[in-house]
Amino acid sequence: MSDQKEMRAVYAETLISLVEEGKDIVVLEADLMRATGTTAFAKKYPDRAVNVGVAEANLVGIASGLSAAGKVPFAATFACFASRRAYDQFFLSANYAQLNVKLIGTDPGVTAAFNGGTHMPFEDLTLMRVIPRLTIAEPSDPISLAAITRLGANLKGSFYMRLQRKPAPVIYRENESFSIGKAKVLREGGDVTLVALGTVMVNEALKAADMLAQEGIKATIIDALWLSPLDEETILAHSGCGCIVTCENHRVTGGLGSAVAEVIAEKAPGVRLARIGVAADLFGEVGTLDWLAERFALTAPHIADAARTLIQQK
């Protein structure tokens, strides 16, 4: 995990490759091409790049129209705007209409950093998760990002992907295979299972597992990758230890923790569950990524503490 790649650069490169392979992709932005990294795409394919200006609802409306005309639109904006501001348009114009819109929410959770509380989405997954038949993903590294972008492009139906823009450690091999709705088990351990989603929390879960290993506690780490469809089979297969900790760069209500809690309650009652995420009564704040992760208890020590507590309670 020593190598790092800029996630937004990987996103743009993947879209360029898809066009070169014959995919009828159109990229739409709400005045954030530089932030999203799609200026490279626009330079190479100016007739396939549309800047709608600061008008996120219109962004989704135009994307829906392009989908109806047979294009594969990738519409990106900050996740706070993709979810809260354009929610009705995405719900109705894209999903209810059964169109093929790929909505990308950038700067999820604390990765919004200095953009602060107004731009810090802790609830986008909660909102998106209740849209019927919507596929939802959050890559954990540059390799999974490229693969999931490709899977989303080939998926028939609307798709929401969270995208951290900045550099991220490489976790997977270049030839790793990915499938819609299938998680990845990064480590096996019989004492506790850590289910993490997204770049920030998968890397913190890996650190937490190292901390626990020094105490003789062996942790399974599941990189969820997909919130919908959730890989219930993999989660249940690793619930035999009796302890699961979910880890998400998101509010604890409605996202990964809630989804796993529903699975456990219905199919594995008796398994103890702890949810690491932003407390339900907090808004975002301004700060560095590291400071914010500690402020909202999203770091490896908090994950390790939750794991220890569950194990002691067994």
Image (tube, rainbow, N blue to C red):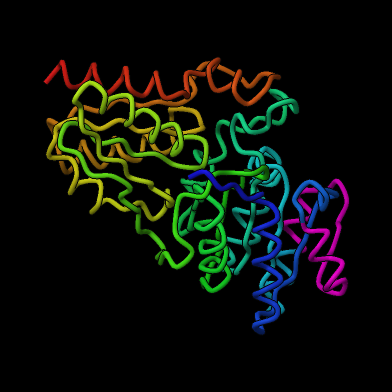
Q: Residue at x 55, y 33 (%)?
A: 123
> Quick check: is 266 in the magenta stretch?
no
- Quarter of the rendering containing residue 264: top left
Residue 7, x across and y down, in percent = 64, 50
Left or right side of 38 for 13: left
Q: How many marks?
A: 0
Q: Residue at x 68, y 68 (%)?
A: 15
Give the farthest residue toward the front: 2
Is residue 154 depicted above or below 295 in this figure?
below
Dominant secondary structure, magenta: helix
> Quick check: is 49 in the magenta stretch?
yes
Left or right side of 206 for 93: right
Q: Residue at x 36, y 24 (%)?
A: 303
Residue 28, x across and y down, in percent = 77, 61
Residue 309, x across and y down, in percent = 23, 16
Residue 256, x across and y down, in percent = 40, 38
Quadrant housing the C terminus: top left
Identify which residue, 117 or 244, lies in the foreground.
244
Left or right side of 274 for 11: right
- Range shown magenta: 38-62
Give the farthest residue toward the bottom: 22
Is residue 180 depicted above or below 122 in this figure?
below
Q: Residue at x 44, y 41 (%)?
A: 197
Is residue 86 depicted above or below 191 in this figure?
below
